[in-house]
Image (spheres, coloured by chain):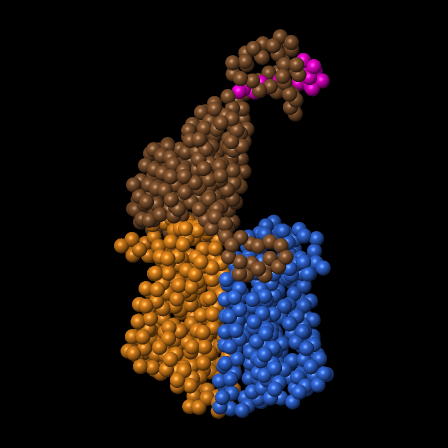
Chain colours: A brown, B orange, C blue
Amino acid sequence: MIEVEGLSKSYRVPLRPEGRFALVRSLWSREAREVRAVEDISFRVAQGERVGFLGPNGAGKTTTLKMLAGLLEPSAGRVRVLGHRPQDRDPRYLSQITLVMGQKQQLLWDLPPRDTFALNVAMYDLPRAQARDTLDELVEMLQLAPLLQRPVRNLSLGERMKCELAAALLHRPRVLFLDEPTIGLDVEMQAQVRTFIRGINARFGATVLLTSHAMADIAALTPRLLLIDGGRLRFDGPMAELTRSLAPERQVRVRGERAALLPVLAPLGFVEEPDGMRADVPVARVNELLGAVLARMPGADVRVEDVPLEEVLRRAFRGEAGAPA
Amino acid sequence: MRVLRAWPVLLRVAWAEMFAYRAEMVVWILGTSLPLVMLALWDAAAESGALAGFTAGEVARYFTAVLVVRQLTAIWLAWEFDHDVRTGALSPQLLRPMHPLWWRAAETLAAVPWRVVVLVPLLGALGAWRPEAVAPPDVATCGVFALSLALAWLVGWCVQVCFGCLAFWFEQALGAWQAWFFAWGLLSGYLVPLALMPPSLRDVAAWLPFYATLGAPVDLLLGHADPWGTLARQGAWAIVLAAVASAAWRAGMRRYGAVGA
Amino acid sequence: MAILGLVRTALAGAVQYRASFLLDATTGLGGALAVVLPIAFVYGRAPSIAGWTRPEALLVTGFFLLLQGFVGVVLEPNFAALVDAIRRGTLDFVLLKPADSQLVVSLQRLSPQRAWDGLAGVAVLAVALRDLPAPGPREAAAAAGLFAAGVLATYGLYLAVVCTSFWFVRVDNLRFLLAGVLDAGRWPMGVYRGWVRTLLTVVVPVVLVTSTPALALRGRVGPALAAQSLAVAVAMLLGSRWVWRVAVRRYGSAGG
C-alpha cells in the first residue's frame, strides 16, 4: 500500500551574510547551507491503517507527507503508494489520494464552497450520481448545509476547514494525507474534525496519514505512531508501546492542602505540585506506595495515572531513556 | 477527454468567480482603457503635420482598435502564477488530476464577456466624440480578425506561461515580465503604429512576437496588412512559444519538486 | 528617527531579492525608454506640437519620469502591501503600533530598484535644458516647489484611491487604474482640450503635476496656475488624510 525505503530529502538554503555591509554583500554572496529535512526514513502502511506523524516544528513531517503526495521529489530512497511513484503525479494516482493542508487552501476564496465542489467534480471527472451521493454524505457528516451558499471568505476558520475536507474527499480517495488538519481550530471544532476523520476511515476504508503537533489528534485518531525528530524516524509503533518503553512508571497524585500533605508525604518521596503532591514510581511499587499513603492519611484523595502523553513525547524528543529507533 | 468533459463546468465556475469580482473587473478594464488618452497627443501631432500620410481619423481608428484587441486578449496569468508559486498556493492545484493551467485559461476566458460589456459603452462614447474612430468592418475582415485575435491570445498566453514559470527560480520573476512588457509597448504597435515607424524598424518588428500579440490583429482589422502572411507568422509564433512554454513548465515542475514551497 | 528606522528595514527587505534587484534595474531603463521614444518619434517631423517645442515636451517627460520614480519607489510597494494587509487582516499589527498609522503604511517599504525611472528623468531634464536658455534661480526654485507640491498631490490621490480597498473585495486592479491615470501626465498640457483637460488638471491633476514645473522652468507660470497647483496639493493631502481616518475607523468597526 504505502512503502517507504531509505527516504531522504535535503535542500540548499542560501545564507544571508551577517555583520557590517551584510546588506551589500548579500547582493553577490553565493554561500549556501545544506539542510537535511528528512534522513533515511523507512516504513510501510497497510490499507485502512491510521498513522500519525508526530514531531516538533521542522522535524520533517510535512516534507515527508509532501513526498508521499508527490509534491516533492525525494533526494534519495524509494516511495511507492498504491503501486505508483508519487512524484510522477500520474492523474490515476492523484485521483486516489488527497492532501489536506491546514495552512493552505484549495477553496476558491470569493465563491461559496459549492462552486469549488463543482469544480472538483469536473476536474476529477466523477460520475454525477456518485458525486452527488458523496457530497450529500459529506454535507451530512460535516453539517455543511448552512455553509454551502456563503462565500468562503465569510466563513470562520473551522467552517473553512470542514469545507476543505469535503472538497478534498469528494472523489473518495483511498489515501488521505492530512497536514495539521486541526491547526488553529477551537477545541470543539477539533473534536468534530477528528470524529469526521475516524468516520471516513471507517466508512470508506481509507488509509489515513496525518501530521500534527496536537497530542489530542494523535491520541484520538491514530493507533500507530511515527515519531520524527531532526528528520529521522525515532519510533514506529503503537502509542502504548512508546509509553511503555519511555515512561514505564505511574504517577501517584495526592490532592490536598500543602501544609497537611508535606510532612507526611515528603518522606515517601513525593514532590510538590500546584494542587497537591506527586510521586513517580515503577508499576511494581504502586500498591506498596498506595498502602503507605492510605495508612498514614486515611481517606486521602489519591489517583494513579499514566505519564501524560506530552511528557512521553518530551522525553522522546530529548532522546531520553534509550528511545527505540 | 477529461478536459473537454470538464470544460463547461470550469467555464461556469470561472464565470461565477468573475461575477464576484465584477466591480474590480470594471475598474481594471477602465484602467487598461485609459491609454486612450494618448489619442490627445496623436491628434495634436496629426494637426501639426507630424504624421506624414496619417490623418487624425486614421490615428483615432488605429488606437480604438488597439483598445479593443488589448481588452479581448487581456491575460493576467503571469501575476497569478508568480503569486501561486511564491506562496505555495500552487501545491493544492497540482494535486488535482488536471493541469492547473486549464483552470486559469477558463478564468481568463470567463472575463471576456465583462470586457465586452465595458467596451460597448466605451466605444459608443468614442463614436459620439470622434465618429471616424469607430467604423464597423465587413464580414470577411471580421473572420480574419477573429482568427488573428485567437492566435494573438494564444501567443500572449504562452508568453505569460513562460514568464510565470520563471517564478520557480526567481523570487521576483515579475521583473523580467516588466522588461518584456516595455519591449512590447515599443514594438507591438501599442505606443506607435508600425506603419509610422522607420521602415527598417518596421520590417524587424513585424516579425517579432510582440506584433503577433497586438499589432497583427489591429492591422488586419483596419486592412493595413497582408492577411495570410500575418496569420502565418502569428501561427508560427504560437507553435514556437507553446513548445517553449511547455518545456519551461516541465523544467519548472522538476524545480518545484526539488525545492517545494 | 522613526522614519530612518523604517527606511532601513524597508531597504533590507528589498535587497533580499538579489537576482531580481539587478533585473529590475535594467527593466527600469527600458521603461524610461518607452516613455521618451514616442516623444522623439512624434517630434521627428514637426518642430512644435500644440504650442510645445520638443525640448519643452521633454521637460514634461523628465518630470513625468521623476514622478513615476517616486510612485515606483515609495507609493506602489507600500500601497500594494496595504491592500494585501487589508485583505488578510494583518493591518491590525500596524494599527497596534504607537506611531501614526498613515505614516507607517506609507513608508514601511521601499523599492530602490525602481529608482531608475527617476534617474532617467534627471537625465532627460538635463538633455532638454541643453536646448533651452538656462533657467534662473527663481525659475528653478519655482519648478522644484511646484513639483514637490505635485508629488504630494499624487501621494494624496493614490492613498485616497487605495483606501477604497477597505470597502471593496479586491482592488489589486486599482494599480492599473492609477497607472493609466498617471500615464496621462506624459504629454504636455497643451495636447489636452476641453473637458479632458479640466479632468486632468482639476479632478485627477496628473497633467498639472508634470506640466507646471516644466512651464515654471521656462518662466511661464502665472500666479493663477501656481495657486491652482498648490491648492490642488493641499486639497489632495487633507482629503486623503480624511479618507484614511474614515477608512481606519470602518476597519475597526468591521471587526477584522
Locate residue B29, reporting x and y percent: 47, 68
Q: Is residue B123 above or below residue A306?
A: below
Locate residue A300, reporting x and y percent: 63, 13
Count of numbered badges drawn on the protein: 0
Return the residue nearer the eye: A251 or B111: A251
Q: Is residue C256 visible?
A: yes
- Based on the picture, tell me whether residue B117 belongs to the magenta stretch: no
Locate residue C16, reporting x and y percent: 55, 58
- For residue B255, what is the image quadrant? bottom left
- For residue C64, what is the image quadrant? bottom right
Give the residue furthest to the top: A295
At horizontal 42% and vertical 72% (from top left) the residue drawn is: B70
Q: Quadrant of the N terminus of chain C?
A: bottom right
Q: Which residues are magenta?
A: A249-264
At horizontal 44% and vertical 73% (from top left) the residue drawn is: B184
Q: Is residue C163 above or below residue A95?
A: below
Q: Is residue C211 above or below residue B26?
A: below
At horizontal 41% and vertical 64% (from top left) the residue drawn is: B160
Left or right position of A87 against A157:
left
Locate residue C209, reporting x and y percent: 62, 76
- For residue A25, what is the image quadrant? bottom right
Q: Is residue C188 visible?
A: no
- Based on the picture, tell me whether residue A263 belongs to the magenta stretch: yes
At horizontal 54% and vertical 11% (from top left) the residue drawn is: A287
